[in-house]
Image (tube, rainbow, N blue to C red):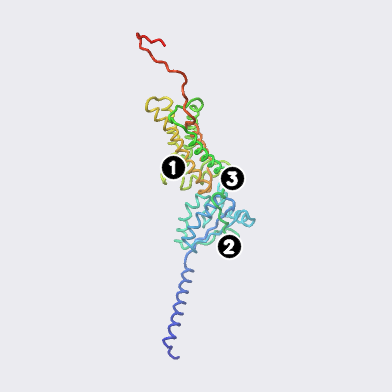
Amino acid sequence: MPDLLPNQRRPLLALIIALIVLLHGAVAAAAAPVAHAVLFYSPTCPHCHVVIDEVLPPLQSRYGEQLAVAMVDVTRPDGQALYRSAITAFAIADDRLGVPTLIMDETVLVGSAEIPAQLPGLIETTLAAGGNRWPAIPGLEAAVGAGATTTPPPALSPFQRDPLANSLALIVLLGMIVSVVAVLFRTQPPFDRPLTGWRRRAVPLLALAGMAVAAYLAFVELNGGAAVCGPLGDCNTVQQSPYARLFGVLPIGVLGVFGFGAVLVAWALQRFGSGPAAHWAGLALPIMAFAGTLFSIYLTFLEPFVIGATCMWCLASALLMTALLWITVPRGPAEVRRGKPTRRVPRGAHQDAI
């Protein structure tokens, strides 16, 4: 075989190097472990969209092809059949039924709190063990092979995740904004006027109600339990969000207890105190109610437009603070006592005739 000329060797050498690189990449890809999981979801489930839109994308970006998640829509007949098979295969208890449900190996994760809390560690453990196969759910591998379970639902905006509850939050938000603007235009000095009539009796009742609501939320936040939300809204998603703690440290519920408690203390000092203490307490009452309403506006805005869920307890707290604003802020001119003041004449002195 004749020797190759120098100009013929270069293309051949480049071809050999390219083949080696391609083969090395193929072998490396084949050898890379993969973590397989299945996610059962509903397109109209707010919790599901938290997992699909916020939890999975960064994990998929981090692990790339080493993370494979099959998406199963339980609103479709074939998806519902797979979900029922999963319930039977993994003996999922009745109190853990519902979506989103993610299964990896023998581990079943349920809810938008449990999945983001445990899935990253579960992926690391699975990859360190050399990867895994699809969960042992009858019919799952066939569905994945047919390409029927890999298309995620379209992303929803935070407001669309729970339009009914978020619409209610929007109404409350607009009402608070209108209240703040109206109060600014109607407020007139002096600002330390004592409360009278029904307003004097309403302040402690509203403050105590606000403290009760805030104390319940603080209990939920500090203990990590599930809040009783009722049929409308999703308090637990709100309480588990990063915005449930001020600066990531102080639970908002605890802050609410102190806020309503401060209003109650200021009312008591103005009502039963005297001198400078009563004066400064009278000034502090409307200022604290105004600041509390502004902070409630911020929190209420976060629910429908950032978090994508609305907490009815939080709306109740916001409404109570707004009511305190209307009651404590002085409106209209101060009352002027009519009539000529009498001049006190010392005993034994004579008063000139008029």
Using the image as rendered, state which of residue 209 and residue 189 is in the foreground: 189
Crowding near the residue tagged with mark 2, few <14, some 14–19, many ≥20 C-alpha atoms within 10 Å: some
- Quarter of the image with the N terminus in it: bottom left
Looking at the picture, how far across and down is residue 348, in whole percent? Answer: 35, 8
Q: Nearer the viewer, mark 1 or mark 3?
A: 3
Position of residue 196 relative to residue 164, above or below, is: above
Residue identifier under label 2: 144
Seen at 47% across and 68% down, the residue is 31
Quadrant in the rendering for residue 168: top right
- Identify the residue shown where x is 45% and y is 73%: 24
* SS under mark 2: helix
327 or 56: which is nearer to us?
327
- The mark found on residue 175 in the picture is none
Residue at image point 50% right, 25% down: 197
Q: Which residue is mark 1?
A: 251
Q: Position of residue 117 (x, y in %)?
A: 47, 51
Task: Tell me the quarter of the image containing the C terminus.
Answer: top left
Mark toward the start of the polypeptide (1 vs 3):
3
| Residue at x 57% of width, y 47% of height | 162
Query: The residue under label 2 is which amino acid type?
Result: Val
How far, Cα to Cα, is label 1 from label 3? 26 Å
Q: Is residue 76 left or right of residue 48?
A: right
